[in-house]
Image (cartoon, rainbow, N blue to C red):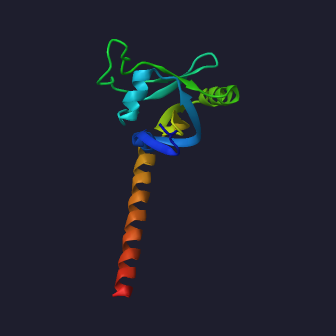
Amino acid sequence: MAKEKGRKLIAQNKKARHDYQILDTYEAGLVLSGTEVKSLRQGRASLADGFVQLDGHEAWLHNVHVPEYSQGTWTNHSARRKRKLLLHRVEIDKLESKSQETGHTIVPLALYFKDGRAKVEIALARGKKEYDKRQTLREKQDRREAERTISAIKRKQRA
């Protein structure tokens, strides 16, 4: 079998981009068992409630749901177990110092295969207030409306 090239997206955490202001992003490898990899290759995972916890120079991914592999036997994994993240020591130290600040957390944004290896994109984030979320939605709607009017004007000019 030829080695995979490129990036194949498995799951995204769209809610994180809505609930948090993303300050910095990192790419981390994952320590997985065989049935977890097979389940991910089927494109089944959920990052909705996931978060990263730092314990003594190690990063752990919690609450990410990778369903059991359908053809797995007694060697199957548990769906919501904590998984170790592979990061450089400098990155872990930087994340640890930044996450100690008030209101900062580390959340997973995307889970994907990159050149055949499972990776997770994590972000240092600050929680948004309710009015910030509304303002972001309003800006998004305004942008869409402006694009619609521009495209309508262009259509009229062509006709």
Using the rendered view, name the quadrant where residue 36 is placed: top left
Q: Is residue 109 visible?
A: yes
Q: Residue furthest front?
A: 1
Where is residue 44? Give x, y as percent.
35, 33
Is residue 99 rendered to the left or right of residue 149? right
Name the residue located 37 percent from the left edge and 67 percent from the top edge.
145
Name the residue located 35 percent from the left edge and 35 percent from the top edge.
42
Using the rendered view, name the quadrant where residue 147 is placed: bottom left
Along the line of sight, which residue is nearer the eye, 149 or 119? 119
Name the residue located 56 percent from the left edge and 30 percent from the top edge.
29
Q: Is residue 129 visible?
A: no
Where is residue 156? Give x, y as percent.
34, 84
Q: Classify 67 as above or below 55.
A: below
Where is residue 28? Give x, y as percent.
57, 32
Where is residue 109? Give x, y as percent.
48, 38
Q: Residue furthest left?
A: 70
Along the line of sight, which residue is nearer the eye, 37 or 150? 37
Along the line of sight, which residue is nearer the eye, 119 or 62? 119
- How many discs appear? 0
Q: Residue furthest right?
A: 90
Q: Quadrant of the C terminus?
A: bottom left
Is residue 19 rendered to the left or right of residue 103? left
Along the line of sight, which residue is nearer the eye, 101 or 131? 101
Is residue 58 rendered to the left or right of residue 82? right
